[in-house]
Image (cartoon, coloured by chain):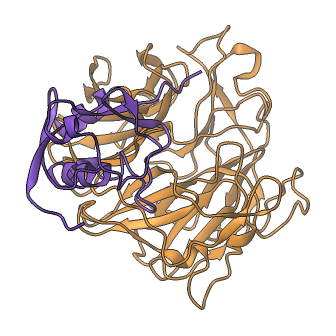
Chain colours: A orange, B purple
Amino acid sequence: MSSVRVLVGTRKGAFILSADGERRNWRVSGPFFAGWELYHLKGSPVDPNRIYASQCSGWFGQLIQRSDDGGATWNPVDNKFAYNGTPGTHQWYDGTAHPWEFKRVWHLEPSLTDPDTVYAGVEDAALFRSTDGGGSWHELSGLRGEGSSANTHAQQWQPGAGGMGLHTIILDPTNAKRMYIAISAAGVFRTEDEGASWKPINKGLVSEFIPDPKAEVGHCVHHVAMHRTRPDVLFMQKHWDVMRSDDAGDNWREVSGNLPTDFGFAIDVHAHEPETVYVVPIKSDSEHFPLDGKLRVYRSRTGGNEWQELGKGLPDKDCYVNVLRDAMAVDTLDQCGVYFGTTGGQVYVSPDSGESWMAITRDLPAVLSVEVQTLAS
Amino acid sequence: MHPTAASTVRVVLPFHLRTLARVEGDVALAVQTPVTVRQVLDALESSYPMLRGTIREYETGARRAFLRFFACEQDWSNEPQDKILPEAVQSGREPLIILGAIAGG
């Protein structure tokens, strides 16, 4: 029988939640790296025992940990993230030029084909790659404008309130040369040559809070999701607005439809239904909690616009948590499971594609990220 | 001054770095003389490479902002890293203490 392993990064350590394919009875192990911030953990799709974790601290900086036995034991690997050449500048909050400074790794994305290859999205925004299992990291600096093909306007990028992090990395399973990344608050970018050169793909995004609401860069993209069988179709939770692209990001259109609020952070796509999308609406950019204290997931089975409220098993009142951008995931079991974690320390699972929910655990530190591994027996 | 024979220096690490380095108690290091903060940290990172970047910034070699260095009840945090440490530290009678600053709030 298949099983699942949920990798949870929190403000104070990592946790691993395990269950069989029924997803009713759970084992919680951890904390791993207790006391440290775990921004993200993710396993290799080709070797589920290989897991990478981003561990950081305001005191001690950034570490990367690697497990080769499914999270039972861990070893630190290289933690040196050096920008190529002279790092240059981006815009600071006041519009002045500010030097690029490495702060932390927000997201780790293992290769779809090689367990030793992994990408790291960092703050200040840049993309790094390791091809030796985390033994060394090298910047793909075309994204920031290094090299002759630079057109990403990196000098104009500006941090969002949470920092200028590269938080989303999507690898195209049908085209090894193509990937997408997203940055707060710069927008979405695509490469067709394995990261050598990039182009902004933000056409159709409208952000009323920036000087030019339709600017080529400067949009506060919170997260992007893709279904593995439809790599040209992208779904986005922007600061405000849920968006969709059917042409690999060249053009976007709003699909917020009947959502009660289209602010939010997390978004994901059902494992087997490419037009089924999940979001967790958050009240506003000023009040990062669910509307009316009622935690709800919304599901669209039409690729957006028509959304259905899902709340069976979720708090109906007095709930004032947030669900962060990397804190939602799906498994690939026949009956797709959906998972999300909250800043209140709850991790919820729906074993039936969103129809009903249960808390796997309720009292973890604030959850920063949730990833799921579906394991064959 | 050229480095010469090694002294055995004791270093006290903060809790999280002891856990990371998988050590208990003080760390004893063979350090080239003259015994300075830089020489001690070079020896520490050579013996425990997982500590690289956690005490000193990679780019500048500077002490990370929320760590402090103490020796013989004196704050060495802002002393030049090439200043020779007290004899009691050089001889191992007193440790070099690396301390996490109380930076909360």
Q: Nearer the viewer, residue A63 or A183?
A: A63
* Image quadrant where residue A199 sits: bottom right
Depth order, front residue of A165/B51: B51
Q: Position of residue B62 (x, y in %)?
A: 44, 53
| Residue A308 is at least partly visible in this image | yes
> Residue A103 versus residue A295: which sits nearer the camera?
A103
Give the left or right position of residue B42, taking residue A181 as reference: left
Is residue B53 left or right of A162 when viewed as pictured? left
Measuring from the top left, give residue A122's x and y in whole percent. Answer: 50, 56
Q: Position of residue A255 (x, y in %)?
A: 75, 49
Count of number-bearing discs: 0
- Residue lying at 54% horizontally and 18% vertically, measured from the top left: A344
Left or right for A17, reference A210: left
Q: Quadrant of residue B71?
A: top left
Residue B72, horizontal then vertical, whole percent:
30, 29
Q: Please report the residue visible at 48 percent of the width from the left and 37 percent of the height from the top.
A: B66
Residue B41, placed above or below residue A296: below
* Residue located 84% across and 57% down the image: A206
* Quadrant occupied by the C terminus of chain A: top left
- Give above or below for A85 relative to A32: below
Residue A3 seen: no
As displayed, is residue A113 above or below residue A198?
above
Q: Which of these two is toward me, B69 or A133?
A: B69
Q: Is residue A369 above or below residue A88?
A: above
Which quarter of the image is occupied by the N terminus of chain A? top left
